[in-house]
Image (cartoon, helix red, strand yellow):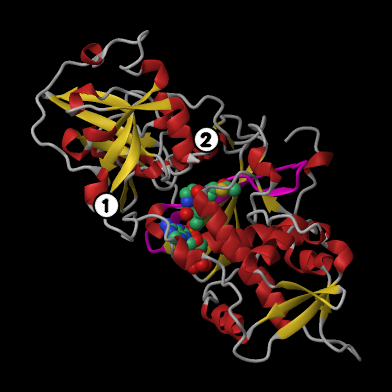
Amino acid sequence: MMERKLSEDYEEVPCDSANAVVEGCRLPVLMRSGAEYQMAEILSIKELAAMREYYVHFLDFNKRLDEWVDEKRLDPSKVFFPKKISPSRPSSPVAGDVPTLPLLATTSSTPSLNKKKKQGQKRPYDEIDRSSSQPPTPAPSPGPATPITLIKEEIPDLLSGGPATPAGQGAATTAGPRTTGSLMMHSNDDVVTRMKNIEMIELGKHRIKPWYFAPYPQELVHLPCIYICEFCLKYRKSAKALERHLLKCKLRHPPGNEIYRKNNISVFEIDGRKNKQYSQNLCLLAKLFLDHKTLYYDTDPFLFYVMTQLDNRGFHLVGYFSKEKESSEDYNVACILTLPPYQRKGFGKLLIEFSYELSKFEGKLGSPEKPLSDLGLLSYRSYWSHTILGILFTHKASGDQERPQITINEICELTSMKKEDVISTLQTLGVISYYKGGFVIVLTPEMGKNHEKSSRLTKIDPKHLHWTPKDWSKRAKW
Ligand code: ACO
Ligand code: ZN
């Protein structure tokens, strides 16, 4: 796909130095780990003390790996120009005229992509390790398998034999930008918002490197660090200014109602209308780690569920999800985030579990707002697979049934998951087979072992949830 795009819209032009490289070009760039060259697009070029720096986006990688690199990391022997600005086009400037920025001497020639890239080398990204996160695929059964009969009328898309849609993405992936949302999809993906603009934030005891652009006020952007009060989320431009703020700020927990507490984990419900400033600051902070959504300042239609960890200094923000007060599409999560220092410790799945517990209390089925990010999809797939397998493994045959029987609707009712998420999860798990004119789910002992191994220690305990759902449709105004 990428190759096709490169060949259609781009033209390879031999260059002997990085000087010819202009914004919009694509060429191999050495990744941060130093192990591998990857094709990248130059989004911006700046000059610092007579040195050129290039802001690059690696084409097949998530934007959080975008960064400023110096010319030593570029491989100018394989530069692709967009056809409209290609130096080889008669209507475009000729090769010698192309660079729009002052020419600088190249110090070293960079080895070519083919020379550097070792065969079978693992991608050096510190980010998604997809291999470890794939749901278990049913291996040939080493022992007796557990079949469960599935009612066939309920899975029409399985009958059609069409390709499985990735769980959670479905048709909604192609949906256009939403018109409501505390965060919604980018309407214009301009170069400014494609580039990270904040170097660092300090939040409580954590220093965190942002992943994406966030529209903090202009005077704070490009400072070495933005200092954020971890309790009220107000931001300051220096440590001194934050110190002064902390003397006045009495908050030691998020505003709103604490609706859940078990051990040191609490969840606060915050109304986006009643606590507008906190909610907006939370969205702004979240934008640093959410790429496919853009800020929307009207937080009134949203509730925010903020998860904290308690110690003797207060309730520390771990993550949150937002939820529309009324969702015509049955979304039970708009945006979800675990702050990077707390990621990969199970908090994402805890937040997801919490969102489904709320749906259970409401007596509704729910699903996260689409599209999901790469990490969002991984987390949801993992949660859905684990939850559904948990039900299937404990489901017993009743009465004189030869084997346990279950319907998709029953799984939905037990989990509050929407039907399409249940079906796509079963498809992704690859557990459904057609057998003697009907559908059966076949679970192998191997899957049972994997399921037990991946059980989480911390789970939401509904007994500790003190919450009554509100019917927002009956209220004249949120
Ligand atoms: N690489 C590989 N796997 C990962 C990574 C990673 N970087 N991060 C999480 N995972 C996997 C975990 O291994 C786990 O899989 P497993 O159950 O098979 O072990 C699963 O994802 C969930 O892990 P958790 O620790 O429960 O989740 P975490 O606390 O890391 O939070 C979240 C997940 C919320 C998606 C987090 O990565 C995040 O905040 N990302 C940035 C914002 C974002 O993308 N949000 C989702 C947008 S979609 C939406 O808002 C509806
Ligand atoms: Zn404060």
The image shows residue 68 at horizontal and vertical percentages of 26, 35
Name the foreground residue: 128 vs 283: 128
First in sequence: mark 1 vs mark 2? 1
Q: Quadrant of the C terminus?
A: top right
Residue 347 seen in the figure: no
Q: Which residues are magenta?
A: 311-339
> Is 383 in the magenta?
no
Q: Residue at 31% across / 26% down in the picture?
A: 44
Query: Can you say whether 5 is above or below 45 in the image?
Result: below
**Res 83 → quadrant:** top left
Q: Is residue 19 shown to the viewer in this render?
A: yes
Task: Say if mark 1 contacts mark 2, CB within 8 Å.
Answer: no
Query: Type of residue at label 2?
Result: Gln
Q: Residue at x 68, y 80 (%)?
A: 443
Viewer-nearest residue: 416 or 103? 103
Q: Residues within 10 Å of mark 1 (few under 14, many from 20)?
A: some
Q: Is residue 317 magenta?
A: yes
The residue indicated by pointer 1 is 117
Q: Which residue position holds label 2?
A: 280
Ligand 2 has an atom within 8 Å of the beta carbon of the residue at disc 2: no
- Left or right of 387? Residue 402 is right
Relative placement, left or right, of 183 versus 409 is left
Q: Residue at x 54, y 53 (%)?
A: 376
Judge from the rendering whether residue 416 lies leftward or rightward of residue 186; answer left or right. Answer: right
